[in-house]
Image (cartoon, helix red, strand yellow):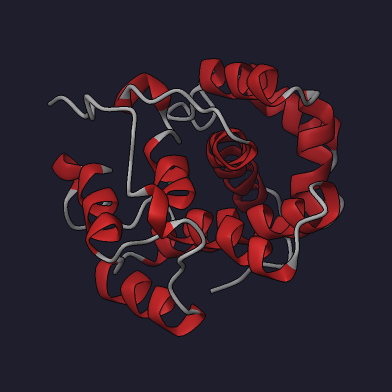
C-alpha cells in the first residue's frame, strides 16, 4: 500500500485565507471520524496547534484557527478510508477551496509516508506534535493519575523503551524536533499541560 502523494503543491494560491467555519469543520470531523480514540487524538493535536500558534507564533485569532483546523482534520480520513490516507481529506479540502497552507500542512504531517517535506511553521509543528502527542497520551493511560504529576523525565524514559507505544516512530519525533528547531524536552513540557485539558 503506497501512501505517497506524488505531488508537492496543494490547493490554489487564490484560496489563501479561506477556512471552514468552526461548525463546518466539526461537522466534517464528526461525519468522517467515528472512532472515539482517533477523535480524541485529533482534538489533542488541534488544541496543541492552537495553543502553540497563540503562545509562540504571535498568531492572530484568525491564524490560530487555521493552525487548529489543520490539527483537527489531519487524520480525518484515517478512520473510514485508511488506504486513502491522507489523499482523501486533501482532495476534499481542495474541492472546498480551502487555504493551501492548511492543506499542505496536512499533506506533510508524515513526510516519510506521504513524500511531502514540511516547510512552513504550520507544517513543522503539526509533524512535531503528531507522534509525540500520541506517545504522551499512551503514557497517561498507564499512569494511575493520568496526566497528574507527569513530567518530562518520565516521558523521555518511555521514549527510550522501544516496546512502549511501539507504533510511535521515534525517528519521526527526532526528525520533527530537528526540523522545527525545538528541543525535545521543551516540546514535551509544552504538550503535557495542554493535552491534560483535552477531553472528548
Ligand atoms: Fe495524527
Tell me which residue sits at (64%, 37%) in the image.
121
Tell me which residue sits at (55%, 19%) in the image.
170
Residue 109 x %, y %: 45, 36
Please tell me in which quadrant of the rendered image residue 28 appears: bottom left
Tell me which residue sits at (77%, 49%) in the image.
192
Residue 132 x %, y %: 61, 36
Residue 163 x %, y %: 51, 22
Q: In the image, is 97 to the left or to the right of 105?
A: left
Q: In the image, is 9 to the left or to the right of 147?
A: left
Compared with 62, 113 (above or below) is above
Compared with 38, 23 (above or below) is below
Would residue 147 be seen by someone viewing this image from the given angle?
no
Compared with 38, 86 (above or below) is above
Q: In the image, is 94 to the left or to the right of 99?
A: left
Please tell me in which quadrant of the rendered image residue 4 appears: top left
Compared with 84, 185 (above or below) is above
Please tell me in which quadrant of the rendered image residue 55 appears: bottom right
In front of the other: 45 or 122: 122
Residue 184 x %, y %: 76, 25
Which quadrant is home to the N terminus?
A: top left
Q: In the image, is 109 to the left or to the right of 161?
A: left
Amino acid at each position: 500500500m503506497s501512501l505517497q502523494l506524488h505531488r508537492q503543491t496543494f490547493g490554489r494560491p487564490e484560496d489563501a485565507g479561506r477556512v471552514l467555519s468552526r461548525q463546518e469543520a466539526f461537522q466534517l470531523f464528526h461525519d468522517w471520524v467515528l472512532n472515539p480514540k482517533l477523535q480524541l487524538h485529533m482534538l489533542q493535536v488541534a488544541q496543541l496547534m492552537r495553543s502553540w500558534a497563540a503562545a509562540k507564533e504571535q498568531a492572530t485569532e484568525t491564524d490560530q484557527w487555521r493552525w487548529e483546523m489543520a490539527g483537527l482534520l489531519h487524520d480525518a480520513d484515517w478512520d473510514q478510508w485508511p488506504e486513502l490516507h491522507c489523499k482523501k481529506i486533501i482532495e476534499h479540502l481542495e474541492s472546498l477551496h480551502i487555504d493551501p497552507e492548511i492543506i499542505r500542512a496536512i499533506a506533510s504531517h508524515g513526510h516519510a509516508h506521504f513524500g511531502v517535506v514540511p516547510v512552513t511553521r504550520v507544517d513543522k509543528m503539526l509533524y512535531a506534535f503528531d507522534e509525540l502527542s500520541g506517545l504522551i497520551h499512551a503514557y497517561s493511560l498507564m499512569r494511575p493519575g493520568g496526566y497528574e504529576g507527569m513530567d518530562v523525565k518520565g516521558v523521555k524514559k518511555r521514549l527510550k523503551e522501544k516496546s512502549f507505544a511501539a507504533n510511535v516512530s521515534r525517528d519521526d519525533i527526532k526528525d520533527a524536533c530537528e526540523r522545527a528547531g525545538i528541543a525535545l524536552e521543551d516540546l514535551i513540557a509544552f504538550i503535557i499541560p495542554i493535552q491534560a485539558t483535552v477531553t472528548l
